[in-house]
Image (spheres, helix red, strand yellow):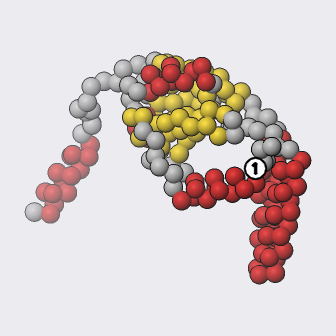
Amino acid sequence: MPAQNKDAQKSLAQEPVVPTSQPLEPEKELYSWKAPARPFKRRSREFWLRVIVSASVLGLIIFLAEGVMPVILLISVIFLFYVMSNVEPEEVTYKITNRGIKIADKTTDLGSLTRFWFTNRLGNDLLVFETIFLPNRMELTINKIDKEKIKKALSLYLTEEEVPPARIDKVTSWFSDKLSERQK
């Protein structure tokens, strides 16, 4: 009896798989725009002074508790932040198609996206997608004039619904508010 089951499994494995769904329609572009690759805001001297002082105090505490390696990590993260705050991002072409989102000719499938919403950070308008893979969000910069056209194109495939901020989002917003320049 087990030999017959093995033969049946082999014959099933050798049969070609016939798709049961409708054939895919050809990919067509619904909307495209050009925008910076990431949000960007040039920081003032006072901001960097505040960051350096805060990092120095934190680095001293970490050095006394853990040693030199965490301090090196802290310095490298601040250096990365400094470089990203001083080097303007390149312009990238974004495309919405009936199959997904193309960013500089790399496609993210619509099946990987669950919903979208619009937000603003660092004075830049952003289109945010909730994804099924880590880091659970994909953010694209947009131009204000493109917002309604993007919304119309995406509404055919995804739900527009803002996700409430997670704890990590609240913490980063709090730190950002504390470090940002004061309004006079």
For the image, the number of numbered tags is: 1
Q: Which amino acid does label 1 sit on?
A: Ser
The residue lying toward the viewer, choosing from 2 and 173, is: 173
Task: Identify which residue is drawn at 61% across, 24% down.
Answer: 144
| Residue 88, placed above or below residue 182 | above
Label 1 neighbour load within 10 Å: few <14, some 14-19, many 20+: some
Residue at screen point 59% across, 35% down: 126
The residue shown at (38%, 29%) is 157
**To which quarter of the image does residue 65 belong?**
bottom right
> What residue is drawn where x is 89% and y is 47%?
45
- The quarter of the picture where the C terminus appears is top right
| Residue 170 visible in the shown view | yes
**Label 1 element class:** loop
Q: Nearer the viewer, residue 111 or 26?
A: 111
Which residue in the rendered view is the most extreme toward the bottom?
65
Pick the quarter of the image with the N terminus.
bottom left
Q: Quadrant of residue 39?
A: top right
Q: In x, y percent, where is residue 109?
A: 46, 35
Q: Which residue lies furthest to the front in this view?
A: 184
Residue 59's place in the image compared with 39, above or below, is: below
Q: Name the residue under label 1.
A: 180
Residue 60 lies left or right of residue 137; in this view the side is right
- Which one is nearer the viewer's eye here, 141 or 16? 141
Residue 51 vs 106, above or below: the answer is: below
Q: Where is residue 67 in the image (x, y as percent from the top left)?
A: 80, 78
Give the image location of residue 130, x and y in percent: 47, 43
